[in-house]
């Protein structure tokens, strides 16, 4: 079955979702499908807030984007009616952690000691992947275990990193 809105709708019908109202968990693409959103809209968690994906200059500047309050087809990249309520979806922790790590590294000073530490710990990862913050769980765990990484970060990045480690 193709991962498309109609396929998800058919699947929910076959398992009688309306009758049982289970909580659901899936990758970000599945969440976007369940909420009726464009699939290209899953790069960031746009189903949570109303961040404007085309506003690149404010991506790391604006810290508070308004919380999404509705999922109305035709508005803010919603193309179909939601198949489930957003409250019925659990977000997958690994996807959240990978997304946070990606944004953390993309926001780092590329000439700083912290970024050089990331490059040294991830020797088998291409420079392009490191700059874009594309990691796997094992690489994140390796960085978390290194004490030197904490010390190589400036104060604001260190605070972000410590918060990230608590997740």
Image (cartoon, grey):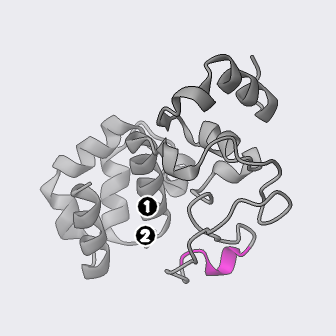
Side of 120 where 101 appears, left or right:
right
Q: Nearer the viewer, residue 26 or 155?
A: 26
Q: For the point 82% across and 57% down, which residue is it?
A: 73
Q: Give the SS element for disc 2.
A: loop
Name the spot of residue 59 as percent of width and height, x first. Answer: 60, 74
**Number of residues whose C-alpha sits closer than 10 Å to that of mark 2, classed few (under 14), some (14–19) or many (20 or more):** some
Secondary element at tag 1? helix
Decide if residue 134 is in sight here: no
Residue 11 higher or lower than 162, as above or below: above
Tell me the residue at 75%/70% (across/down): 54
Side of 157 where 26 appears, left or right:
right
Dividing the picture into quadrants, the one containing residue 156 is: bottom left
Q: Are marks 1 and 2 in contact (CB under 8 Å)?
A: yes
Q: Position of residue 132 (x, y in %)?
A: 55, 55
Query: Image quadrant of residue 136?
Result: top left
**x 19%, y 65%: residue:** 150
For the N terminus, which image quadrant? top right
Q: Is residue 91 left or right of residue 19?
A: left
Farthest residue, direction front: 19
Q: Which mark identifies residue 150? A: none
Name, please, the residue furthest toward the right. 74
Instruction: Relative to 56, say whether 130 is above or below.
Output: above
Instruction: Locate the C terminus by quadrant.
Output: bottom left
Nearer the observer, 18 or 133: 18
Q: Which mark is residue 105?
A: 1
In the displayed structure, 42 sits above or below 53; it is: above
- The magenta-colored residue range is 55-60
Which residue lies under the disc numbered 2?
Answer: 108
Foreground of the two, 43 or 144: 43
Q: Quadrant of residue 18?
A: top right
Where residue 122 sits in the image (x, y, percent)? 36, 43
């Amino acid at each position: 079955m193709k991962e498309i809105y109609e396929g998800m709708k058919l699947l929910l019908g076959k398992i009688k979702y309306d009758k049982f109202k289970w909580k659901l968990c899936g990758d970000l693409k599945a969440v976007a499908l369940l909420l009726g959103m464009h699939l290209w809209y899953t790069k960031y968690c746009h189903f949570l807030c109303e961040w404007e994906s085309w506003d690149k200059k404010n991506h790391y500047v604006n810290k508070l984007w308004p919380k999404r309050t509705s999922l109305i087809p035709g508005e803010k990249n919603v193309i179909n009616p939601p198949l489930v309520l957003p409250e019925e979806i659990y977000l997958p922790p690994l996807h959240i952690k990978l997304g946070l790590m990606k944004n953390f590294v993309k926001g780092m000073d590329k000439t700083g000691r912290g970024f050089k530490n990331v490059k040294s710990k991830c020797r088998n990862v291409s420079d392009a992947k490191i700059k874009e913050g594309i990691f796997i769980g094992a690489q994140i765990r390796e960085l978390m275990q290194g004490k030197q990484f904490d010390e190589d970060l400036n104060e604001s990045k260190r605070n972000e990193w410590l918060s990230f480690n608590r997740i």
